[in-house]
Image (tube, grey):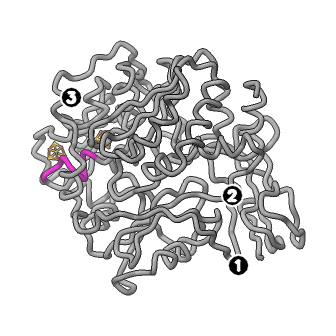
Amino acid sequence: MVSEKIVASVRETGVVGAGGAGFPTHVKIAAKDIDVVIVNGAECEPLLRVDQQLMEVHAREVVQGLRAVCQATGAKRGVIALKRKYDKAEQALRDEVSKASELDLFLLDDFYPAGDEQVLVHEVIGEIVPEGGIPLMVGAVVINVETLLNVSKALKGLPVTRTYVTITGEVKRPVTARLPIGISIREAIDLAGGSLIGDDYMVIEGGPMMGKIVSNISAPITKTTKGLILLNKSHPLIESKSGALSIEIKRAMSVCCQCRLCTDLCPRHLLGHAIEPHTTLRAVSYGITSDVKAITQAFLCSECGVCDEFACVMGLSPRKMNMEIKRVFAQKGFKNPHHEKELTADPMREFRKIPVKRLIYRLGLAELNVGAPLTEEEYEPKRVVLLLKQHVGATSQPIVNVGDVVKEGDLIGEIPEGALGARVHASISGTVREVDRETIIIER
Ligand code: SF4
Ligand code: SF4
Protein backbone atom coordinates (compact mmCIF):
# COMPACT_ATOMS: atom_id res chain seq x y z
CA MET A 1 0.00 0.00 0.00
CA VAL A 2 1.37 3.47 -0.81
CA SER A 3 2.05 5.75 2.13
CA GLU A 4 -0.84 8.19 1.38
CA LYS A 5 -3.25 5.26 1.36
CA ILE A 6 -1.97 4.02 4.72
CA VAL A 7 -2.45 7.48 6.25
CA ALA A 8 -5.93 7.75 4.71
CA SER A 9 -6.99 4.32 6.07
CA VAL A 10 -5.79 5.24 9.55
CA ARG A 11 -7.70 8.52 9.39
CA GLU A 12 -10.88 6.88 8.11
CA THR A 13 -10.91 4.28 10.87
CA GLY A 14 -10.43 6.73 13.75
CA VAL A 15 -7.11 5.48 15.12
CA VAL A 16 -5.65 7.55 17.96
CA GLY A 17 -2.73 6.99 20.34
CA ALA A 18 -4.19 4.34 22.61
CA GLY A 19 -1.63 4.78 25.36
CA GLY A 20 -1.77 8.48 26.07
CA ALA A 21 -3.90 11.54 25.42
CA GLY A 22 -5.17 10.16 22.09
CA PHE A 23 -3.18 12.09 19.50
CA PRO A 24 -4.68 11.35 16.06
CA THR A 25 -2.46 8.68 14.51
CA HIS A 26 -3.02 9.74 10.89
CA VAL A 27 -1.37 13.07 11.74
CA LYS A 28 1.51 11.43 13.59
CA ILE A 29 2.33 9.00 10.77
CA ALA A 30 2.07 11.66 8.07
CA ALA A 31 5.45 12.97 9.34
CA LYS A 32 8.36 12.69 6.91
CA ASP A 33 12.18 12.54 7.21
CA ILE A 34 11.94 10.00 10.00
CA ASP A 35 14.92 7.80 10.89
CA VAL A 36 13.23 5.43 13.25
CA VAL A 37 9.81 4.36 14.50
CA ILE A 38 10.01 3.25 18.12
CA VAL A 39 7.24 1.08 19.50
CA ASN A 40 6.59 1.86 23.14
CA GLY A 41 6.20 -1.60 24.66
CA ALA A 42 7.59 -0.61 28.06
CA GLU A 43 4.26 -0.60 29.92
CA CYS A 44 6.12 0.64 32.98
CA GLU A 45 3.05 1.58 35.07
CA PRO A 46 2.69 -1.09 37.76
CA LEU A 47 -0.35 -3.41 37.55
CA LEU A 48 -1.21 -2.68 33.89
CA ARG A 49 -0.99 -5.73 31.63
CA VAL A 50 -2.27 -4.65 28.20
CA ASP A 51 0.74 -4.11 25.95
CA GLN A 52 2.86 -6.97 27.26
CA GLN A 53 0.06 -9.44 26.42
CA LEU A 54 -0.85 -7.87 23.08
CA MET A 55 2.80 -8.14 21.96
CA GLU A 56 2.69 -11.84 22.82
CA VAL A 57 -0.75 -12.76 21.45
CA HIS A 58 -0.87 -10.36 18.48
CA ALA A 59 2.82 -10.18 17.57
CA ARG A 60 2.10 -10.56 13.87
CA GLU A 61 -0.45 -7.71 13.73
CA VAL A 62 1.79 -5.44 15.84
CA VAL A 63 4.65 -6.00 13.40
CA GLN A 64 2.31 -5.49 10.41
CA GLY A 65 1.26 -2.18 11.94
CA LEU A 66 4.89 -1.21 12.52
CA ARG A 67 5.84 -1.96 8.91
CA ALA A 68 2.92 0.16 7.71
CA VAL A 69 4.00 3.09 9.92
CA CYS A 70 7.62 2.75 8.71
CA GLN A 71 6.33 2.83 5.14
CA ALA A 72 4.05 5.83 5.75
CA THR A 73 6.78 7.88 7.42
CA GLY A 74 9.62 6.65 5.23
CA ALA A 75 11.50 5.52 8.34
CA LYS A 76 14.53 3.37 7.66
CA ARG A 77 14.20 1.45 10.92
CA GLY A 78 11.50 0.15 13.23
CA VAL A 79 12.39 -0.82 16.80
CA ILE A 80 10.07 -2.48 19.30
CA ALA A 81 11.24 -1.48 22.77
CA LEU A 82 9.97 -3.76 25.49
CA LYS A 83 11.04 -4.81 28.96
CA ARG A 84 13.52 -7.67 29.18
CA LYS A 85 11.13 -9.34 31.62
CA TYR A 86 8.37 -9.76 28.97
CA ASP A 87 10.08 -12.92 27.77
CA LYS A 88 7.02 -14.49 26.09
CA ALA A 89 6.34 -11.30 24.14
CA GLU A 90 10.01 -11.12 23.18
CA GLN A 91 9.90 -14.64 21.83
CA ALA A 92 6.74 -14.03 19.80
CA LEU A 93 8.08 -10.77 18.38
CA ARG A 94 11.53 -12.18 17.54
CA ASP A 95 9.93 -14.66 15.16
CA GLU A 96 8.14 -11.81 13.39
CA VAL A 97 10.89 -9.17 13.25
CA SER A 98 13.41 -11.72 11.99
CA LYS A 99 11.45 -11.68 8.70
CA ALA A 100 12.32 -8.00 8.04
CA SER A 101 15.86 -6.64 8.07
CA GLU A 102 14.75 -3.09 8.96
CA LEU A 103 13.05 -4.22 12.20
CA ASP A 104 14.59 -4.98 15.55
CA LEU A 105 13.85 -5.37 19.26
CA PHE A 106 15.34 -3.28 22.06
CA LEU A 107 15.24 -4.73 25.58
CA LEU A 108 14.71 -2.32 28.46
CA ASP A 109 15.49 -2.84 32.13
CA ASP A 110 12.58 -2.85 34.54
CA PHE A 111 12.55 0.78 35.66
CA TYR A 112 10.04 3.60 35.86
CA PRO A 113 9.32 5.59 33.71
CA ALA A 114 10.91 3.61 30.86
CA GLY A 115 7.74 4.33 28.88
CA ASP A 116 8.01 8.14 29.09
CA GLU A 117 8.55 8.78 25.39
CA GLN A 118 11.50 11.10 25.94
CA VAL A 119 13.16 8.59 28.27
CA LEU A 120 12.43 5.85 25.75
CA VAL A 121 13.96 7.79 22.87
CA HIS A 122 17.13 8.34 24.90
CA GLU A 123 17.34 4.67 25.85
CA VAL A 124 16.84 3.40 22.30
CA ILE A 125 18.75 5.89 20.12
CA GLY A 126 20.80 7.84 22.68
CA GLU A 127 19.35 11.23 21.62
CA ILE A 128 17.77 13.78 23.93
CA VAL A 129 14.54 15.42 22.79
CA PRO A 130 14.85 19.24 23.19
CA GLU A 131 13.06 20.87 26.12
CA GLY A 132 9.36 21.17 25.42
CA GLY A 133 9.90 19.21 22.21
CA ILE A 134 8.69 15.98 20.65
CA PRO A 135 10.59 12.88 19.41
CA LEU A 136 10.13 14.04 15.81
CA MET A 137 12.79 16.69 16.50
CA VAL A 138 15.41 13.93 16.77
CA GLY A 139 14.04 11.93 13.84
CA ALA A 140 11.87 9.53 15.83
CA VAL A 141 8.20 8.65 15.95
CA VAL A 142 7.07 6.85 19.10
CA ILE A 143 3.96 4.73 18.83
CA ASN A 144 1.98 2.60 21.26
CA VAL A 145 1.48 -1.17 20.90
CA GLU A 146 -2.33 -1.17 20.79
CA THR A 147 -2.22 1.72 18.34
CA LEU A 148 -0.22 -0.47 15.95
CA LEU A 149 -2.77 -3.23 16.34
CA ASN A 150 -5.42 -0.68 15.33
CA VAL A 151 -3.26 0.43 12.39
CA SER A 152 -3.08 -3.17 11.17
CA LYS A 153 -6.89 -3.37 11.41
CA ALA A 154 -7.22 -0.02 9.64
CA LEU A 155 -5.39 -1.53 6.65
CA LYS A 156 -8.31 -3.99 6.43
CA GLY A 157 -10.83 -1.15 6.77
CA LEU A 158 -11.81 -2.02 10.37
CA PRO A 159 -12.55 1.03 12.53
CA VAL A 160 -11.67 1.41 16.23
CA THR A 161 -14.67 0.14 18.20
CA ARG A 162 -12.92 -1.77 21.01
CA THR A 163 -10.18 -1.04 23.50
CA TYR A 164 -8.10 -3.30 25.72
CA VAL A 165 -8.32 -2.48 29.42
CA THR A 166 -6.72 -4.04 32.50
CA ILE A 167 -9.26 -4.09 35.32
CA THR A 168 -7.44 -4.85 38.54
CA GLY A 169 -6.86 -3.97 42.18
CA GLU A 170 -9.51 -4.99 44.71
CA VAL A 171 -11.64 -6.85 42.15
CA LYS A 172 -12.59 -10.51 42.29
CA ARG A 173 -11.00 -11.52 38.95
CA PRO A 174 -8.33 -9.15 37.64
CA VAL A 175 -8.53 -9.31 33.87
CA THR A 176 -7.41 -7.61 30.67
CA ALA A 177 -10.46 -7.43 28.45
CA ARG A 178 -11.32 -6.23 24.96
CA LEU A 179 -14.24 -3.92 25.61
CA PRO A 180 -16.68 -2.01 23.41
CA ILE A 181 -15.88 1.69 23.60
CA GLY A 182 -18.65 3.53 25.44
CA ILE A 183 -19.57 0.98 28.12
CA SER A 184 -19.49 2.40 31.64
CA ILE A 185 -16.61 2.00 34.06
CA ARG A 186 -19.10 0.27 36.39
CA GLU A 187 -19.84 -2.38 33.74
CA ALA A 188 -16.12 -2.94 33.20
CA ILE A 189 -15.64 -3.50 36.93
CA ASP A 190 -18.53 -5.98 36.94
CA LEU A 191 -16.77 -7.89 34.15
CA ALA A 192 -13.85 -8.36 36.56
CA GLY A 193 -16.21 -9.90 39.10
CA GLY A 194 -16.96 -6.66 40.92
CA SER A 195 -15.47 -5.20 44.08
CA LEU A 196 -13.90 -7.36 46.77
CA ILE A 197 -14.39 -4.65 49.38
CA GLY A 198 -18.03 -3.64 49.04
CA ASP A 199 -18.69 -0.01 48.19
CA ASP A 200 -15.72 1.35 50.09
CA TYR A 201 -13.62 1.90 46.98
CA MET A 202 -12.41 4.41 44.48
CA VAL A 203 -11.19 3.80 40.95
CA ILE A 204 -8.05 5.09 39.28
CA GLU A 205 -8.26 5.34 35.50
CA GLY A 206 -4.82 4.69 34.01
CA GLY A 207 -1.80 3.45 35.92
CA PRO A 208 -1.18 4.01 39.63
CA MET A 209 1.49 6.65 38.89
CA MET A 210 -0.10 8.81 36.21
CA GLY A 211 -3.72 7.73 36.41
CA LYS A 212 -6.50 9.93 37.77
CA ILE A 213 -9.24 9.22 40.27
CA VAL A 214 -12.57 8.61 38.56
CA SER A 215 -15.24 10.91 39.92
CA ASN A 216 -18.17 9.08 38.31
CA ILE A 217 -18.11 5.35 37.57
CA SER A 218 -21.06 5.75 35.20
CA ALA A 219 -18.68 7.57 32.84
CA PRO A 220 -17.87 5.73 29.59
CA ILE A 221 -14.57 4.14 28.68
CA THR A 222 -12.87 5.65 25.64
CA LYS A 223 -10.29 4.76 23.01
CA THR A 224 -7.54 5.74 25.47
CA THR A 225 -8.73 3.87 28.59
CA LYS A 226 -5.98 1.39 29.44
CA GLY A 227 -6.42 0.60 33.12
CA LEU A 228 -9.06 0.66 35.85
CA ILE A 229 -7.63 0.09 39.31
CA LEU A 230 -10.04 -0.36 42.18
CA LEU A 231 -8.57 0.56 45.57
CA ASN A 232 -9.83 1.02 49.10
CA LYS A 233 -10.81 4.64 49.76
CA SER A 234 -8.21 4.79 52.53
CA HIS A 235 -5.36 3.49 50.34
CA PRO A 236 -2.37 5.90 50.53
CA LEU A 237 -2.40 6.28 46.74
CA ILE A 238 -6.01 7.48 46.80
CA GLU A 239 -5.21 9.90 49.63
CA SER A 240 -2.18 11.21 47.81
CA LYS A 241 -4.07 11.71 44.54
CA SER A 242 -7.07 13.38 46.16
CA GLY A 243 -5.23 15.87 48.43
CA ALA A 244 -6.32 19.48 47.81
CA LEU A 245 -3.70 21.81 46.35
CA SER A 246 -4.31 24.53 48.94
CA ILE A 247 -3.43 22.08 51.73
CA GLU A 248 -0.43 20.80 49.75
CA ILE A 249 0.92 24.35 49.55
CA LYS A 250 0.59 24.87 53.31
CA ARG A 251 2.23 21.52 54.02
CA ALA A 252 5.05 22.31 51.60
CA MET A 253 5.72 25.61 53.39
CA SER A 254 6.02 23.90 56.74
CA VAL A 255 7.79 20.62 55.96
CA CYS A 256 9.78 20.88 52.71
CA CYS A 257 13.41 20.64 53.84
CA GLN A 258 14.76 21.44 50.34
CA CYS A 259 16.63 18.13 50.32
CA ARG A 260 16.17 18.21 46.49
CA LEU A 261 15.58 14.47 46.24
CA CYS A 262 12.60 15.23 43.99
CA THR A 263 14.98 16.98 41.60
CA ASP A 264 17.72 14.37 41.81
CA LEU A 265 15.27 11.62 40.81
CA CYS A 266 13.19 13.61 38.29
CA PRO A 267 13.49 11.68 34.98
CA ARG A 268 13.32 14.86 32.87
CA HIS A 269 15.94 16.60 35.05
CA LEU A 270 18.15 13.53 34.58
CA LEU A 271 17.83 13.94 30.81
CA GLY A 272 19.34 17.40 31.22
CA HIS A 273 16.12 19.42 31.00
CA ALA A 274 16.12 22.55 33.16
CA ILE A 275 13.50 21.33 35.59
CA GLU A 276 14.14 21.38 39.35
CA PRO A 277 10.91 20.57 41.17
CA HIS A 278 12.30 21.50 44.61
CA THR A 279 12.69 25.11 43.43
CA THR A 280 9.12 25.18 42.07
CA LEU A 281 7.84 23.93 45.40
CA ARG A 282 9.81 26.63 47.23
CA ALA A 283 8.66 29.41 44.91
CA VAL A 284 4.98 28.39 45.04
CA SER A 285 4.76 27.73 48.77
CA TYR A 286 6.50 31.01 49.68
CA GLY A 287 4.89 33.00 46.88
CA ILE A 288 8.27 33.94 45.32
CA THR A 289 6.84 34.95 41.93
CA SER A 290 10.04 36.81 41.01
CA ASP A 291 11.72 33.42 40.50
CA VAL A 292 10.31 33.15 36.97
CA LYS A 293 12.36 30.12 35.98
CA ALA A 294 11.17 28.16 39.03
CA ILE A 295 7.58 28.75 37.94
CA THR A 296 7.84 28.41 34.14
CA GLN A 297 9.90 25.21 34.33
CA ALA A 298 6.58 23.52 35.17
CA PHE A 299 6.11 23.35 31.37
CA LEU A 300 8.87 20.72 31.31
CA CYS A 301 7.10 18.39 33.74
CA SER A 302 5.80 15.11 32.29
CA GLU A 303 3.60 14.53 35.37
CA CYS A 304 5.27 11.13 35.82
CA GLY A 305 4.79 11.23 39.60
CA VAL A 306 8.32 10.19 40.59
CA CYS A 307 8.69 13.29 42.77
CA ASP A 308 5.56 12.80 44.85
CA GLU A 309 4.82 9.07 44.80
CA PHE A 310 8.42 7.92 45.17
CA ALA A 311 11.02 10.57 45.96
CA CYS A 312 9.62 12.89 48.60
CA VAL A 313 9.97 11.52 52.10
CA MET A 314 7.59 14.23 53.35
CA GLY A 315 4.80 13.16 51.02
CA LEU A 316 4.79 16.50 49.18
CA SER A 317 3.71 16.93 45.58
CA PRO A 318 5.76 19.14 43.26
CA ARG A 319 3.81 17.45 40.46
CA LYS A 320 0.48 18.91 41.61
CA MET A 321 2.03 22.37 41.66
CA ASN A 322 3.40 21.88 38.16
CA MET A 323 -0.01 20.74 36.93
CA GLU A 324 -1.71 23.74 38.45
CA ILE A 325 0.87 26.15 37.01
CA LYS A 326 0.39 24.62 33.55
CA ARG A 327 -3.38 24.82 33.91
CA VAL A 328 -3.28 28.51 34.81
CA PHE A 329 -0.74 29.32 32.08
CA ALA A 330 -2.87 27.48 29.49
CA GLN A 331 -5.91 29.50 30.57
CA LYS A 332 -3.98 32.74 30.14
CA GLY A 333 -2.46 31.62 26.83
CA PHE A 334 1.16 31.62 28.12
CA LYS A 335 3.51 29.40 26.15
CA ASN A 336 6.53 27.40 27.29
CA PRO A 337 9.64 29.62 27.15
CA HIS A 338 12.12 26.71 27.61
CA HIS A 339 13.47 25.27 24.34
CA GLU A 340 17.11 24.36 25.00
CA LYS A 341 18.40 21.89 22.42
CA GLU A 342 21.98 21.27 23.52
CA LEU A 343 21.40 18.93 26.40
CA THR A 344 23.56 16.47 28.29
CA ALA A 345 22.12 13.71 30.45
CA ASP A 346 23.10 13.71 34.11
CA PRO A 347 26.08 11.35 34.66
CA MET A 348 24.19 9.84 37.62
CA ARG A 349 21.15 9.02 35.49
CA GLU A 350 21.91 5.29 35.19
CA PHE A 351 22.02 4.96 38.97
CA ARG A 352 18.84 6.92 39.61
CA LYS A 353 16.39 4.89 37.60
CA ILE A 354 13.52 3.70 39.79
CA PRO A 355 13.23 -0.12 39.94
CA VAL A 356 9.58 -1.02 39.37
CA LYS A 357 9.70 -3.65 42.16
CA ARG A 358 10.67 -0.99 44.70
CA LEU A 359 8.12 1.39 43.31
CA ILE A 360 5.35 -1.18 43.79
CA TYR A 361 6.30 -1.58 47.48
CA ARG A 362 6.51 2.17 47.93
CA LEU A 363 3.02 2.56 46.45
CA GLY A 364 1.60 -0.09 48.80
CA LEU A 365 0.58 -2.27 45.85
CA ALA A 366 2.68 -5.41 46.43
CA GLU A 367 -0.33 -7.55 47.33
CA LEU A 368 -2.30 -6.34 44.33
CA ASN A 369 0.53 -6.89 41.85
CA VAL A 370 -1.01 -9.95 40.22
CA GLY A 371 -1.62 -11.12 36.65
CA ALA A 372 -4.63 -9.92 34.68
CA PRO A 373 -5.01 -12.51 31.92
CA LEU A 374 -6.10 -11.35 28.50
CA THR A 375 -9.54 -12.38 27.30
CA GLU A 376 -10.92 -11.58 23.86
CA GLU A 377 -14.38 -12.82 24.76
CA GLU A 378 -16.96 -10.49 23.21
CA TYR A 379 -19.04 -8.48 25.64
CA GLU A 380 -22.35 -7.30 24.23
CA PRO A 381 -23.62 -4.26 26.10
CA LYS A 382 -27.19 -3.00 25.81
CA ARG A 383 -26.13 0.63 25.61
CA VAL A 384 -23.01 2.67 24.86
CA VAL A 385 -22.21 6.32 25.42
CA LEU A 386 -19.72 7.49 22.80
CA LEU A 387 -17.84 10.68 23.51
CA LEU A 388 -17.24 12.83 20.46
CA LYS A 389 -13.92 13.88 21.90
CA GLN A 390 -11.75 10.93 22.87
CA HIS A 391 -8.63 12.42 21.37
CA VAL A 392 -6.38 15.47 21.13
CA GLY A 393 -7.92 18.17 18.93
CA ALA A 394 -11.38 19.29 17.97
CA THR A 395 -14.56 17.53 19.09
CA SER A 396 -16.02 15.45 16.27
CA GLN A 397 -19.31 16.52 14.72
CA PRO A 398 -22.24 14.10 14.98
CA ILE A 399 -23.47 12.87 11.60
CA VAL A 400 -26.38 10.75 12.86
CA ASN A 401 -29.76 11.70 14.29
CA VAL A 402 -31.98 10.31 17.02
CA GLY A 403 -33.82 7.25 15.68
CA ASP A 404 -31.17 6.30 13.10
CA VAL A 405 -30.29 2.63 12.99
CA VAL A 406 -26.53 2.02 12.88
CA LYS A 407 -24.30 -0.99 12.53
CA GLU A 408 -21.13 -1.58 14.54
CA GLY A 409 -18.32 0.26 12.77
CA ASP A 410 -20.54 2.88 11.09
CA LEU A 411 -19.19 6.40 11.11
CA ILE A 412 -21.13 8.57 13.60
CA GLY A 413 -18.74 11.47 14.31
CA GLU A 414 -16.74 13.33 11.63
CA ILE A 415 -13.61 15.50 12.01
CA PRO A 416 -14.58 19.17 11.56
CA GLU A 417 -13.33 20.59 8.24
CA GLY A 418 -9.62 21.45 8.41
CA ALA A 419 -9.29 20.61 12.11
CA LEU A 420 -7.00 18.25 14.02
CA GLY A 421 -9.20 15.42 15.23
CA ALA A 422 -10.31 11.81 14.92
CA ARG A 423 -13.42 10.11 13.61
CA VAL A 424 -15.81 8.26 15.94
CA HIS A 425 -17.59 5.01 14.99
CA ALA A 426 -20.51 3.08 16.46
CA SER A 427 -19.18 0.41 18.82
CA ILE A 428 -22.42 -1.63 18.75
CA SER A 429 -25.28 -2.11 16.32
CA GLY A 430 -28.51 -0.48 17.44
CA THR A 431 -30.62 2.66 17.44
CA VAL A 432 -29.31 6.14 18.16
CA ARG A 433 -31.17 7.34 21.27
CA GLU A 434 -29.50 10.64 22.07
CA VAL A 435 -27.25 13.06 20.21
CA ASP A 436 -25.72 16.25 21.50
CA ARG A 437 -22.50 18.16 20.88
CA GLU A 438 -20.49 15.90 23.15
CA THR A 439 -22.04 12.43 23.10
CA ILE A 440 -23.99 9.93 21.07
CA ILE A 441 -25.94 7.22 22.89
CA ILE A 442 -26.75 3.98 21.07
CA GLU A 443 -28.99 1.22 22.40
CA ARG A 444 -28.98 -2.29 21.05
S1 SF4 B 1 11.89 15.79 48.08
FE1 SF4 B 1 10.19 16.70 49.26
S2 SF4 B 1 11.19 17.62 51.01
FE2 SF4 B 1 12.80 17.25 49.51
S3 SF4 B 1 12.94 19.16 48.32
FE3 SF4 B 1 11.53 17.83 47.24
S4 SF4 B 1 9.52 18.41 47.98
FE4 SF4 B 1 10.98 19.23 49.46
S1 SF4 C 1 6.18 14.76 37.95
FE1 SF4 C 1 7.89 15.36 39.23
S2 SF4 C 1 9.50 13.88 38.74
FE2 SF4 C 1 8.01 13.76 37.08
S3 SF4 C 1 8.75 15.18 35.50
FE3 SF4 C 1 7.33 16.33 36.85
S4 SF4 C 1 8.66 17.26 38.37
FE4 SF4 C 1 9.85 15.64 37.41
Q: For label 2, count other residues whose C-alpha is less than 10 Å away and answer few (under 14), some (14-19) or many (20+).
A: many
- Measured as percent of width and height from the top left, residue 123 is found at 34, 27
- Measured as percent of width and height from the top left, residue 165 is found at 50, 61
Does the beta carbon of the residue at mark 1 sit less than 8 Å from ligand 2?
A: no
Q: Which residue is mark 3?
A: 349
Mark 1–mark 2 distance (CA, rounded to whole Å): 15 Å
Give SS at disc 3. helix
Which of discs 2 and 3 lies nearer the camera? The answer is 2
Give SS at disc 2. loop
335 versus 308 height, above or below? above
In this image, 396 relative to 270: left or right? Answer: right
Which of discs 1 and 3 lies nearer the camera? The answer is 1
> Which residue does the image show at 17% across and 49% down from the upper left?
312
In this image, 70 relative to 98: left or right? Answer: right
392 versus 352 height, above or below? below
Q: Main secondary structure of the magenta part?
A: helix
